[in-house]
Amino acid sequence: MTNRITRPTAQRLRRDARRRSVDTQARFTLGRVCELLATHLGNPVSSAELARFTRQLATLLKAGVALLHAFDMLAQSTSNPNLRRLLLALKQAIAAGSGLADALRKHPRYFDALYCNLIAVGEHAGSLDTTLEQVANLQEKRQALQARVKKAMTYPVLVLLVGLGVSAVLLLKVVPQFQSLFAGFGAQLPLFTRQVIAVSEWLIDYTGVMLLLAGGGLLAGHWAWRRKPAFKLWALRHALRLPA
C-alpha cells in the first residue's frame, strides 16, 4: 500500500482544514459578540444580587471573617461570572491599599454615591458590619418599592399596548378597505375622515421607519434605566402618578 497522497485528496484535505478553521473563527466571533452584548446591553449584576452580596458580606464580617477572605468566599460561591469578576476586582483594589468605599466608587454602575458614602461612614466609625446590614436593609426596601411600582404599572401599560395595537390594526388594515369604498361616493368627505385616511396612508408608507424608531426607543430606554440613575428616578416618579 502506497503512502502517497493524490492531488485530489490533498486538495480535499486542505478544503476541510480551511472549513474547520472558518467554522472555529465563526464560533469564536459569535461567542465574543454574545459576550459583549451581555456585558454592555444586558444587566450583568442585578440589584437583587447586589443586595444579597451586601447582606452576606455583613454576615461574614460579623462572624469575624477578614474582609479579603470574605470577598474570596463570596466570589467562589456565586454562579454569576460577572459578579465574580466584580468581587475579585474589589478584592484586588482593597489588597492594593484602597478602602472598601474607595474600591466601590470605582464601579459607579453598581454602587451609587449613597451606597459608597454610607460605607465610608461605617469604615471611619469602625462599624462596617453594622453599616453593611443597614445598607442591605435599605436595598431590600428599595427593591420592594420597585416591585410595587412595576405591579402598579402593569395595568396601564397593558391598556396602552392594547390601545396601540387596536389603533394600528384599524389604521393599517381597516381604513384602507373603507378608503376605496369612500372613493366611489364621488363626494367630499368630512375633514375628520380625510385626516384619518391621511394618517393611515402615512403609517402604511412609513411602517418600517416607525418600527425602527420604536425598537431604538425601547433599547435606549432599557440602557438608560440600567445606566442612568437620574432617568430611573424620573421614570419611577412619573410611574407613581399613573392610574393603577
Image (spheres, helix red, strand yellow):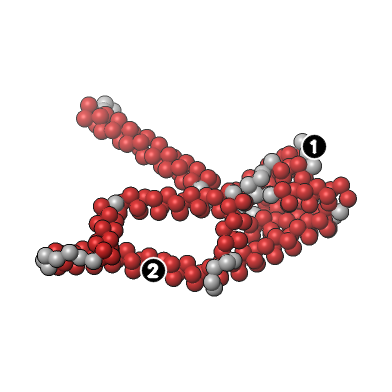
Query: Dot 1 corresponds to which residue?
Result: 97
> What residue is shown at x 56% (from left), y 53% (from top)?
225
- At label 2, the amino acid type is Gly
Q: Indicate left or right for 105 with 186 as reference.
A: right
Using the rendered view, name the quadrant where residue 16 is placed: top left
> What residue is shown at x 57% (from left), y 67% (from top)?
241
Relative depth, front residue between 162 and 60: 162
Residue 163, numbered label: 2
> What residue is shown at x 83% (from left), y 51% (from top)?
122
What is the crowding at mark 1: few (fewer than 14 residues within 10 Å), some, or many (at least 20)?
A: few
- Looking at the rendered structure, the number of numbered marks drawn on it comes to 2
What is the crowding at mark 2: few (fewer than 14 residues within 10 Å), some, or many (at least 20)?
A: few
- At label 1, the amino acid type is Gly
- Residue 194 appears anywhere in the view: yes
Residue 47 x, y percent position in the rendering: 63, 57
- Residue 81 appears anywhere in the view: no
**Secondary structure beneath label 1:** loop
- Quadrant showing the N terminus: top left
**Secondary structure beneath label 2:** helix
Q: Residue furthest right?
A: 125
Q: Indicate left or right for 78 with 169 as reference.
A: right
- As measured in the structure, the alpha-carbon distance from the residue carrying label 2 to the one carrying label 1 is 57 Å
> What residue is shown at x 44% (from left), y 70% (from top)?
159
Using the rendered view, name the quadrant where residue 190 is placed: bottom left
Residue 66 x, y percent position in the rendering: 82, 49
Q: Indicate left or right for 89 with 26 as reference.
A: right
Relative depth, front residue between 5 and 74: 74
